[in-house]
Image (spheres, rainbow, N blue to C red):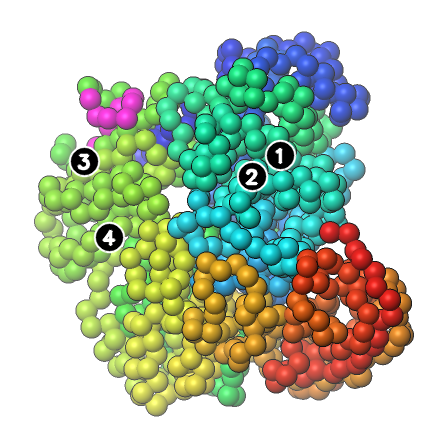
């Protein structure tokens, strides 16, 4: 049978209660905090007044304990929903945010936020009705979106962001938050979190200890505007402080970020949560305090309300919140400071309806049918279509309907894991690029050859290949209480397969930590080379007594594989051991192809054309990873080039003389210099979500007219960039990069053409503080219907610190062939503002140039321009 809940292998606490079972709610029915008729503030204060020091401490961590005597249920604050409900079973999976950014479509992003929040509520409601305890990733407080600025394409987590531009990031982030949280005057659908605040965008390996010097200009101009917008306009309920230090202070203990900006100048009233173990990092990584209790104190004093202590926690029922008990008992922090944090935490729990009868909470009535609904699936497809960016096209695309034989090559064509990116849920029926191409060209013969063993995804070893010593199918599983394997196991059973969901109930419920061992045999279905190993952490894998994979490294992400020749029918002894971890091991393998390049070339020679699906995946770029592949380090990248094995494949199939279309899968910019010169067409599909393959096939066939635009600059190589660890913006992103990019920010081609009339301004002479109205006539001058993304850029009066240009407006407009529309923009004082070299935001006097078009001026995009002047100077609030 399938294991029910490998969460038991982690250091998670088995009983999240203080003074009794979680279900024993003994508070009087007339307790004021249970009375929805009272003002929320009164209810919260009444509850806090009844709490002991230990009870207060137990609420300041992500796994907040139940307090049965007060009727307070346990609550785990940690859930993720970057582009769909993540790590909590099946859910609609939308494109990775970098692909969402390419849509330039905030209206549809808001609809996506509604869909994600709705599915999150369905999952919560299901657990509530079942009467079971919510586990990690099953709450209503979602730690999304990631609105860090993707300042350097080497950062592995840039895929999670909305790109390199502060204005685009702000508009997309606001739309996401408003969709997630909803517009009910009393209840949140779910709570959203703007992260990681702030100045946080790599390198990954040093994030727990790095101190980043950054100028006030770059903070105000680049790193903070999106956070400010989500707080002041989006009304985001939560903000997450980052790991790193900024200008000598940890982000979770920063006077400037947390006090001066967030609480004082922006008026933020919600709660602040730390990145996981960022509070402990104040002491152990940054050495900013002498003890972790002092770290807890300084973060509380800076308004950090919730400490994600999930990582690095020692065993013990109170080990995660002892730091807060100690801080209060030692007199390091006042009760008033603690109560203020508790006030913010319980306020959001009440606004989520967690202390009210479900009948009063509108979101508690959402039907289960909303989960993975056809409507949400259609929305995922719409966003995937809009995210497609056509980088190059010499006329090959769209492919002619009569094409007879297509060779599809590339290691990513038939894979579905690449569609989901990272921080993702599990799609019900993901469509690979290969399946999407087959569906789009039903009359063509499609021949697929990966062309390389590089990036071929290992799959779970099936039950048919596993057996144990008693002759039964599956592996023998044994579980011990504690961190070693001494004594007899507490639980023994047979697991048919080794593929586990960490959020399922644990096999042992009365121990804070559990260790596990699986033994048995694996049998290959055919002779050949296999890559076999495990993913998961704190685990090791032996095959026939030889250690094959050692995942003791806490940063191991993805499978750890060894290449082994296996004989058909031979039984190989398996042993897998895991000491306490919340990432259970999965046993996976993949056959190794013989002469994959030769097979791909042979397929290309007999085809009319070649479609290559290649790039990188979230197994190479991501969060603090251990990756041993040239060009990648610690989750980041040391090279922007296409991986060598894939470029060799492209060169080989192009040498056959057949037309070549390259479909890129990627979460960051790639320096596809060879392809830019030699491929006939390049389509960037990003990590496009569950419907990605359908969108790819439709775009290649012309059923979808590509309309995405690059949210990042594609550089020619790392030699065009400053040092990765240098956070100064000089020489970075389209706003400050003075070189010639491979493909510029805002670039994207179409199967039709558009024309712009001259901008009509409300006035060519403004006073500082006035709003500028802009109208532009837009026409579809081609033969196909299509969407145009009209982009408005400003160039400012020459002064130190000014960007080359900056995006200040955009509109996605659908036009039928021959159709026309008038596009309107209103630019208020903040839109017209800039930041002085000293870091002061103001509307400056002088002459401005305004450009509207399908991309940046001077990049080959169709644009139109106008000039206007501003008299006077107007300082703006930070």
Q: Are marks 2 and 1 in contact (CB under 8 Å)?
A: yes
Circle 2 packing at 10 Å, graded few (<14), some (14-19), many (20+), is many
Q: Secondary structure at mark 2?
A: helix
Q: Residue at x 29, y 23 (%)?
A: 482
Q: Secondary structure at mark 4?
A: strand
Q: Which mark is residue 561?
A: 4
Marks 4 and 1, Cα distance to the nearest angstrom?
45 Å
Circle 4 packing at 10 Å, graded few (<14), some (14-19), many (20+), is many
Relative to 534, residue 8 above or below: above
Marks 2 and 3, Cα distance to the nearest angstrom?
44 Å
Circle 1 packing at 10 Å, graded few (<14), some (14-19), many (20+), is many
Residue 767 sits inside the magenta stretch? no
Q: Secondary structure at mark 1?
A: loop
- Which tag, 2 or 3, sits closer to the chain's start? 2
Residue 634 x %, y %: 37, 54
Q: Nearer the viewer, mark 3 or mark 4?
A: 4
- Which tag, 2 or 1, sits closer to the chain's start? 2
- The front one of 290 and 703 is 290
Judging by the rendered image, the residue that carries numbered circle 2 is 252
Judging by the rendered image, the residue that carries numbered circle 3 is 519
Which image quadrant for residue 773?
Answer: bottom right
Q: Secondary structure at mark 3?
A: strand
């Amino acid at each position: 049978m399938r294991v029910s809940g490998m969460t038991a292998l982690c250091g998670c606490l088995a009983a999240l209660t203080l003074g009794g079972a979680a279900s024993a709610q003994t508070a009087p029915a007339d307790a004021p905090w249970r009375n929805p008729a009272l003002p929320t503030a009164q209810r919260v204060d009444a509850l806090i007044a009844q709490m002991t020091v230990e009870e207060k401490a137990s609420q300041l961590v992500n796994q907040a304990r139940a307090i049965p005597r007060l009727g307070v249920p346990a609550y785990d604050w940690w859930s993720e929903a970057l582009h769909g409900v993540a790590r909590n079973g099946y859910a609609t999976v939308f494109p990775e945010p970098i692909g969402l950014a390419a849509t330039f479509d905030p209206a549809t992003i808001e609809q996506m936020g509604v869909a994600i929040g709705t599915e999150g509520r369905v999952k919560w409601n299901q657990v509530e009705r079942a009467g079971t305890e919510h586990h990690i990733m099953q709450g209503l407080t979602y730690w999304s979106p990631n609105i860090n600025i993707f300042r350097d394409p080497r950062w592995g987590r840039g895929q999670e962001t909305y790109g390199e531009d502060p204005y685009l990031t702000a508009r997309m982030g606001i739309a996401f938050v408003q969709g997630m949280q909803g517009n009910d005057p009393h209840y949140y659908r779910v709570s959203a979190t703007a992260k990681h605040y702030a100045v946080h965008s790599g390198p990954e390996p040093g994030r727990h200890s790095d101190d980043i010097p950054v100028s006030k200009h770059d903070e105000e101009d680049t790193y903070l505007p999106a956070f400010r917008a989500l707080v002041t306009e989006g009304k985001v309920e939560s903000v997450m402080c980052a790991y790193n230090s900024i200008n000598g202070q940890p982000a979770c203990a920063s006077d400037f970020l947390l006090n001066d900006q967030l609480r004082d100048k922006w008026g933020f009233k919600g709660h602040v949560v730390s990145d996981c173990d960022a509070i402990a990092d104040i002491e152990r990584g940054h050495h900013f305090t002498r003890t972790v209790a002092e770290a807890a104190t300084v973060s509380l004093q800076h308004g950090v309300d919730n400490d994600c202590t999930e990582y690095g926690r020692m065993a013990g029922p109170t080990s995660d919140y002892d730091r807060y008990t100690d801080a209060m008992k030692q007199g390091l922090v006042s009760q008033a400071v603690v109560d203020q944090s508790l006030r913010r935490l319980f306020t959001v729990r009440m606004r989520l309806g967690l202390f009210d009868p479900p009948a009063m909470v509108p979101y508690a009535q959402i039907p289960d049918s909303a989960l993975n609904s056809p409507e949400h699936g259609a929305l995922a497809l719409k966003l995937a279509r809009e995210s497609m960016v056509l980088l190059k096209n010499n006329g090959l695309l769209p492919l002619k309907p009569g094409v007879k034989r297509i060779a599809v090559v590339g290691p990513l064509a038939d894979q579905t894991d690449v569609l989901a990116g990272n921080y993702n849920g599990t799609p019900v029926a993901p469509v690979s690029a290969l399946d999407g191409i087959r569906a789009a060209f039903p009359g063509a013969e499609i021949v697929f050859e990966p062309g390389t063993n590089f990036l071929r995804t290992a799959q779970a070893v099936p039950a048919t290949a596993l057996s144990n010593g008693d002759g039964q199918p599956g592996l023998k599983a044994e579980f011990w209480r504690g961190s070693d394997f001494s004594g007899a196991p507490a639980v023994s059973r047979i697991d048919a397969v080794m593929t586990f969901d960490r959020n399922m109930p644990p096999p042992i419920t009365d121990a804070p930590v559990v260790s596990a061992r699986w033994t048995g045999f694996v049998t290959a279905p055919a002779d050949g080379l296999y890559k076999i190993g495990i993913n998961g952490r704190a685990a090791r894998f032996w095959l026939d007594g030889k250690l094959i994979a050692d995942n003791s490294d806490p940063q191991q992400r993805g499978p750890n594989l060894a290449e082994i020749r296996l004989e058909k029918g031979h039984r190989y002894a398996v042993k897998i051991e895991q000491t306490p971890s919340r990432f259970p091991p999965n046993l996976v393998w993949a056959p190794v192809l013989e002469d994959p390049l030769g097979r791909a070339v042979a397929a290309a020679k007999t085809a009319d054309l070649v479609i290559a699906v290649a790039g990188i995946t979230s197994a190479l770029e991501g969060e603090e990873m251990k990756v041993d592949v040239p060009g990648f380090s610690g989750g980041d990248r040391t090279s922007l080039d296409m991986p060598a094995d894939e470029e060799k494949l492209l060169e080989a199939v192009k040498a056959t003389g057949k037309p070549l279309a390259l479909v890129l899968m990627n979460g960051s910019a790639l320096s596809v210099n060879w392809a830019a010169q030699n491929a006939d067409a390049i389509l960037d599909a990003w990590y496009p979500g569950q419907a990605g393959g359908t969108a790819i096939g439709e775009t290649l066939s012309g059923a979808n007219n590509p309309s995405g635009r690059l949210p990042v600059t594609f550089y020619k190589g790392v030699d065009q960039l400053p040092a990765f660890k240098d956070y100064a913006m000089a020489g970075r992103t389209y706003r400050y990069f003075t070189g010639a990019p491979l493909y510029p920010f805002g670039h994207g081609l179409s199967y039709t053409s558009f024309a712009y009339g001259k901008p009509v301004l409300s006035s060519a002479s403004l006073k500082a503080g006035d709003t500028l109205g802009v109208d532009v006539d837009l026409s579809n001058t081609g033969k196909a219907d299509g969407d145009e993304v009209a982009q408005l850029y400003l160039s400012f009066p020459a002064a130190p610190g000014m960007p080359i240009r900056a995006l200040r407006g955009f509109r996605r407009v659908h036009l039928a062939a021959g159709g026309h529309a008038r596009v309107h923009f209103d630019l208020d004082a903040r839109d017209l503002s800039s930041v002085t070299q000293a870091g002061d935001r103001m509307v400056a006097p002088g002459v401005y140039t305004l450009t509207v078009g399908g991309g940046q001026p001077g990049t080959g995009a169709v644009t139109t321009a106008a000039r206007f002047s501003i008299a006077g100077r107007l300082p703006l609030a930070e």
